[in-house]
Image: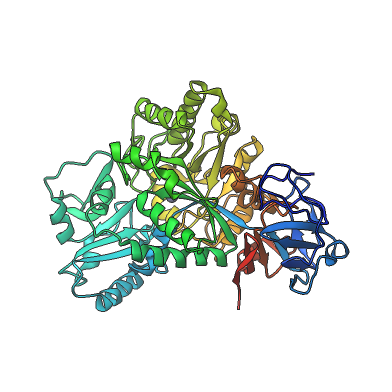
């Protein structure tokens, strides 16, 4: 029997007790007038400790009040209950996306959106159309989602923009978020020319056999444009973020780790929360200063210190994000063995001893630590730093849960260390199949052998690491089922492919569903309250149009969400 902690908690057994605001102050049983929502005839994959299935569940005042057979739950149907007949369809806990950039995704609605185009011709056509429809008063021409996989290792050339928005500053953000294509006007504004030396922690790509910038800039050189392009207005951000969260709900997502947070994002979430429109639990990871900073120095300290004013029952900002390295394309990911193309080891954005000092500072404040790590040298550096700060910090903080994201490469010696350091591993499984991107960018940079061993989901899981699922939207696909399918098959989820795939890191469906539900809740420090369909927990449930366990693995991404329940309310229903 659970204790009555607050007015929202319901006891485990029926009839319902009404809990007072004081611990243990439960009144006499009241007659039950009926649940708000009753699910019957499932298919409910509960993700409880037994990974058991149930036929039915009932929801009252935001919480799950019963899970079991139809017969045991039907008694809770009252005159005002909404009964959802699952009719054999599958329901499971709401999905938690453990590394996502909702506001960046939201701005696809504002900027020229190139996400759907993967040929030079179609990209140019889309840019021309955006230009034709753009406001002549705008000084900037901004686009997102430029597919680097279409181009070679030095990225697209600015000639792609010939005849497009020539009187404006062009900023064409790449699909990896680490590069952008600029036109000459923007290059001039930044003073990037043949004589510009290579920037620290960044790259100005050049034309072949020349010092002339080709227009592609990476990491700190991209960030230099990011900070001078027009600031986002709070009104626009609130409007598009609201739409982004609705979109997340259509995929069954009810919780998110936003790994791209500054004060602007905090204000946006707060406004939505205050308006009752925030249908999402949010753990915001405040970005540390460095290559992608939003705040620096005293300003960053202020934002972290005063974060409580933006927090609520649904929102926490108790996390700091560190960009340990870059990405393979452009060779800014830090690797243990040299790149094939250039022979160097990539870039650690901060020297390990400097990173350790910054991380220790936030660790001692009780913050969760979230590391962007792509190369195996970055992964090892983050683990070394974690080990150092945990063994030099307050032992009371050892239960704090941390995360490493991406892990393109991981050395086998590090497999057991994630569990040892209480760190989850966030994979974007949709990247884990051979594609044009792999062929054009990754194999030239790190070679076939290392590419065959990318994204070690199974190995880290078997070594006891907590795997969490992530979209990295808008740098990856938001739809979790595309990643779920890829994690299980390690094949192209969009259709048959000629490219050779390796399957030794494939995991079974139950493992990847854990990643997207209870494990994500663990990372958010919300596993006592969500992440499984169990009596007493918050009612966060995704209902699919079919049973994912009864279909072929290559059909997983064809399934879709019919209904999403967040905090006991239906927040999405497919027409
Ligand atoms: Zn990311």
For residue 425, which quarter of the picture? top right
Q: Which color scheme did the rendering employ for the protein?
A: rainbow
Q: Nearer the viewer, residue 383 or 151?
A: 383
Residue at 33% in and 73% down: 126
Q: Is residue 537 left or right of residue 499?
A: right
Locate the C terminus by quadrant. bottom right
In the rendered image, residue 258, in percent from the top left (x then y), is placed at 46, 51
For residue 3, which quarter of the picture? top right
Residue positioned most to the top: 392
In the image, residue 365 sits, relative to residue 511, either above or below, namely above
In the image, residue 571 sits, relative to residue 470, either above or below, namely below
Q: Nearer the viewer, residue 4 or 486?
A: 4
Q: Is residue 343 left or right of residue 165?
A: right
Locate the N terminus by quadrant. top right
Residue positioned most to the left: 195
Residue at 74% in and 73% down: 80
Q: Nearer the viewer, residue 199 or 208?
A: 199
In the rendered image, residue 11, in percent from the top left (x then y), is placed at 76, 50
In the image, residue 134 sits, relative to residue 216, either above or below, namely below
Tell me if I can see residue 438 in this picture.
yes
């Amino acid at each position: 029997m659970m204790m009555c902690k607050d007015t929202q908690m319901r006891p485990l057994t029926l009839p319902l007790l009404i809990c007072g605001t004081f611990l243990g102050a439960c009144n006499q049983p009241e007659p039950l007038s009926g649940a708000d929502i009753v699910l019957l005839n499932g298919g409910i994959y509960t993700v409880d400790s037994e990974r058991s299935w149930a036929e039915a569940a009932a929801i009252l005042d935001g919480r799950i009040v019963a899970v079991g057979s139809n017969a045991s739950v039907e008694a809770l149907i009252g005159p005002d209950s909404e009964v959802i007949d699952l009719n054999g369809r599958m329901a499971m806990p709401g999905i938690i996306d453990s590394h996502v950039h909702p506001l960046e995704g939201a701005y696809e609605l504002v900027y020229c959106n190139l996400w759907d185009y993967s040929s030079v011709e179609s990209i140019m056509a889309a840019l021309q159309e955006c230009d034709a429809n753009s406001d002549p008063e705008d000084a900037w021409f901004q686009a997102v989602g430029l597919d680097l996989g279409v181009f070679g290792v030095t990225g697209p050339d600015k000639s792609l923009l010939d005849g497009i928005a020539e009187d404006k500053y062009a900023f064409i953000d790449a699909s990896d978020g680490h590069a952008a294509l600029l036109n000459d006007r923007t290059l001039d504004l930044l003073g990037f020319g043949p004589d510009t030396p290579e920037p620290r922690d960044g790259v100005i790509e050049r034309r072949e056999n020349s010092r002339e910038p080709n227009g592609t800039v990476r990491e700190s050189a991209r960030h230099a444009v990011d900070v001078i392009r027009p600031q986002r207005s709070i009104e626009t951000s609130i409007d598009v973020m609201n739409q982004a969260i609705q979109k997340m709900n259509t995929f069954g997502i009810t919780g998110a780790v936003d790994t791209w947070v500054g004060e602007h994002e905090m204000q946006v979430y707060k406004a939505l929360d205050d308006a009752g429109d925030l249908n999402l639990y949010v753990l915001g990871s405040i970005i540390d200063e460095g290559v992608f900073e939003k705040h620096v120095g005293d300003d960053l300290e202020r934002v972290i210190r005063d974060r409580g004013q933006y927090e609520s029952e649904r929102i926490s900002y108790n996390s700091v994000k560190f960009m340990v390295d870059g990405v393979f394309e452009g060779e800014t990911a830090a690797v243990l063995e040299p790149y094939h193309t250039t022979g160097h080891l990539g870039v650690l954005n901060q020297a390990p001893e400097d990173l350790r000092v910054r991380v220790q500072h936030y660790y001692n404040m009780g913050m969760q630590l979230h590391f962007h790590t792509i190369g195996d040298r970055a992964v090892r550096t983050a683990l070394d730093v974690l080990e150092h700060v945990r063994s030099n910090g307050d032992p009371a903080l050892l239960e704090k849960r941390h995360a490493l994201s991406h892990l393109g490469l991981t050395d086998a010696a590090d497999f057991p260390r994630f569990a040892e350091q209480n760190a989850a591993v966030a994979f974007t499984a949709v990247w884990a199949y051979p594609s044009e991107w792999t062929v054009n960018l990754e194999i030239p940079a790190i070679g076939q052998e290392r590419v065959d061993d990318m994204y070690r989901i199974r190995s880290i899981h078997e070594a006891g690491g907590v795997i969490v699922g992530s979209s990295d939207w808008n740098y990856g696909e938001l739809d979790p089922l595309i990643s779920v399918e890829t994690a299980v098959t390690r094949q192209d989820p969009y259709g048959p492919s000629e490219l050779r795939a390796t399957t030794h890191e494939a995991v079974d469906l139950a493992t990847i569903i854990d990643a997207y539900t209870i494990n994500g809740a663990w990372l958010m420090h919300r596993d006592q309250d969500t992440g499984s369909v169990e009596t007493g927990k918050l009612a966060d449930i995704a209902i699919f149009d079919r049973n994912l366990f009864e279909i072929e693995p290559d059909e997983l991404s064809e399934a879709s969400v019919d209904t999403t329940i967040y905090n006991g309310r239906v927040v999405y229903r497919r027409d």
